[in-house]
């Protein structure tokens, strides 16, 4: 008769210990890059942060030892991401509403869901090349070539799948009883969606939108083909139709320069970019946690 | 007016003529003929899977929301076949309201729960009065008059169900359908809802699906007993049918069908 006490030497217990430790080690290795990356950027970039960084234009490489600031790139990133959001949020939420509320799960719906998944997997550089071919090289936007507008369009392609998917998923979580309740008091389908289902799913949709924005804001490849880069302040509405700087492209350009001043500026920009994306992600977490708590009003 | 059937007697508000309902290829209920009188409470009873809830949902086209559900036959309401292609299901649901099995208040305040339906139906009167009178009719006013701005979820299950009834009354329907409204409630809440139904009878026609035969006996004037039989081809599938339809007294005291007798005495179901 075997003893009921735990026996360390038993082969199944040794195996169990081994696999537990193995998975713990793997988990640690998986988190290491993030920790190193964030600390390294905080260390390298954090020391470069000055008030002038946020107000000055970057100086062209090689002129002097002072690299200037990242003001145009910072504003540019904000503008380009806003343009992307203006395009992607209505289209994405609308498409998600169709998938979750109106579609009956036929071939067309399956095709759209499949298409959205494919779009989510398209490399970001392809989105850039696509907009380059469609907008930039054809000068179709009032004769302008590289522009902030084109950059926003490229990023909107990357945001779209995230927004559609989270809207679709968020709406599917709304219990059917709530829809029946609304339809049962004689509400039409669109009143039901606007007044009952969408508000119930609002926070989960908002979380998805924020994550989509965070993803788009850090993209470089699509912007190289569309918004290119600019050293100069953004002064007015007309600047939308010209080359526009962005943090990601500034990092890409200046990190490759042989001058130390420009490299430091790239580090500073990395710091700002990582910090803002991190805070946007944390914001979306808080939003999601808030959703959990208030699900039952 | 789409199709007026002049032969319908005046006190018949709703009638089913040879109605069969299928989910895809599965036939849930077959060849139902049934009439509902104005101002009556009619219970639909029967064992699980006999199609009574399906029939109830077909009366205000809630089945439209279930994919693949199709109906053959005619459902005449106010002289109109509500399954006519030209009929707007939204309009049908405004005139035939529904209370569901699970209390399903909106995630809004008690006041808004009632105002919502009225507002989207173009109510132009004084909303405060409508909210009060609806809550009074549903026997909920005294319990929640001091917390109209609290969430509908803050109420107990039985109160939530009465809020759902009040919400349905607020749109002034002609018929109220109730799909096992008390199955998720305790006996005391059930009694309150039954009292509410007796009050409502004065102004509305009520059709209720219930698993509780005592409830059918307590509240209803007419009772329809649905049963399920195996297909003739004998592949084991069952189809529901209307076995017996008569006044509640007759159904419970002297049923004509043997199966009705067996069901109400609890031999199966």
Image: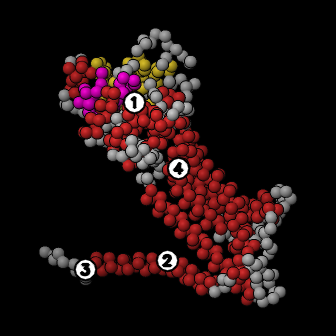
Q: Is residue A164 visible?
A: yes
A178 left or right of B46? right
- The residue where tag 1 is placed is B177
Q: Dot 4: few (<14), some (14–19), or many (≥20) neighbours within 10 Å?
A: some
A174 left or right of B136? right
Residue B218 sits inside the magenta stretch: yes
The segment highlighted magenta reads B200-221
- The residue where tag 3 is placed is A10
Foreground pick, B196 / A290: B196
Q: Position of residue A159 (x, y in %)?
A: 63, 60
Q: Dot 1: few (<14), some (14–19), or many (≥20) neighbours within 10 Å?
A: many
- The residue where tag 4 is placed is A199
Q: Secondary structure at mark 1?
A: strand
Q: CA distance from mark 2 to mark 3?
A: 31 Å
Q: Chain of mark 3?
A: A
3 and 1 marks on the same chain = no
Total marks shown come to 4
């Amino acid at each position: 008769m075997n003893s009921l006490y735990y026996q360390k030497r038993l082969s199944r217990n040794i195996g169990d210990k081994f696999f537990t430790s193995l998975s713990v080690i793997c988990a640690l290795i998986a988190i290491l890059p993030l920790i190193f990356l964030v600390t390294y950027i905080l260390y390298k970039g954090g020391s470069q942060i000055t008030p002038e960084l946020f107000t000055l234009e970057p100086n062209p490489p090689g002129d002097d030892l002072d690299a200037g600031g990242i003001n145009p790139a910072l504003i540019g990133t904000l503008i380009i991401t806003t343009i992307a959001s203006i395009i992607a949020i209505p289209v994405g939420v609308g498409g998600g509403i169709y998938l979750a509320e109106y579609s009956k799960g036929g071939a067309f719906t399956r095709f759209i869901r499949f298409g959205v998944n494919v779009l989510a997997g398209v490399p970001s550089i392809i989105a850039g090349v696509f907009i380059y071919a469609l907008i930039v090289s054809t000068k179709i936007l009032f004769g302008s070539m590289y522009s902030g507008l084109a950059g926003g369009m490229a990023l909107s392609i990357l945001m779209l799948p995230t927004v559609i998917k989270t809207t679709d998923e968020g709406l599917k979580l709304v219990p059917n009883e709530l829809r029946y309740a609304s339809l049962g008091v004689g509400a039409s389908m669109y009143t039901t969606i606007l007044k009952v289902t969408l508000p119930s799913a609002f926070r989960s949709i908002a979380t998805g939108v924020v994550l989509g924005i965070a993803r788009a804001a850090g993209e470089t490849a699509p912007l190289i083909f569309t918004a290119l880069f600019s050293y100069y302040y953004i002064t007015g509405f007309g600047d939308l139709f010209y080359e526009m700087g962005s943090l990601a492209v500034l990092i890409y350009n200046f990190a490759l320069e042989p001058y130390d001043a420009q490299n430091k500026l790239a580090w500073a920009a990395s710091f700002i970019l990582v910090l803002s994306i991190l805070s946007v992600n944390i914001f979306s977490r808080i939003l999601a946690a808030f959703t959990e708590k208030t699900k039952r009003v | 007016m789409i199709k007026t059937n002049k032969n319908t007697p005046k006190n018949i508000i709703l009638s089913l003529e040879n109605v069969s309902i299928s989910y895809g290829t599965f036939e849930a209920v077959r060849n139902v003929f049934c009439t509902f009188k104005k101002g009556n409470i009619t219970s639909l009873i029967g064992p699980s899977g006999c199609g009574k809830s399906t029939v109830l949902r077909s009366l205000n086209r809630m089945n439209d929301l279930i994919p693949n559900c199709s109906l053959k036959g005619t459902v005449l309401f106010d002289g109109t076949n509500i399954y006519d292609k030209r009929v707007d299901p939204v309009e049908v649901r405004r005139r035939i309201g529904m209370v569901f099995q699970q209390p399903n208040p909106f995630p809004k305040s008690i006041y808004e729960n009632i105002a919502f339906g009225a507002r989207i139906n173009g109510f132009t009167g004084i909303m405060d009065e409508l909210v009060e009178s609806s809550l009074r009719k549903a026997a909920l006013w005294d319990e929640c008059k001091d917390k109209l701005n609290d969430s509908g979820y803050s109420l107990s299950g039985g109160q939530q169900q009465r809020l759902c009834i009040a919400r349905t009354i607020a749109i002034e329907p002609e018929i109220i359908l109730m799909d096992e409204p008390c199955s998720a409630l305790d006996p005391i809440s059930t009694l309150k809802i039954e009292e509410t139904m007796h009050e409502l009878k004065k102004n509305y026609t009520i059709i209720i699906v219930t698993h509780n035969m005592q409830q059918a006996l307590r509240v209803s004037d007419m009772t329809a007993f649905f049963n399920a039989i195996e297909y003739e081809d004998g592949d084991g599938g069952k189809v529901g049918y209307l076995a017996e339809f008569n006044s509640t007294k007759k159904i419970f005291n002297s049923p004509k069908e043997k199966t009705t007798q067996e069901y109400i005495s609890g031999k199966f179901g």
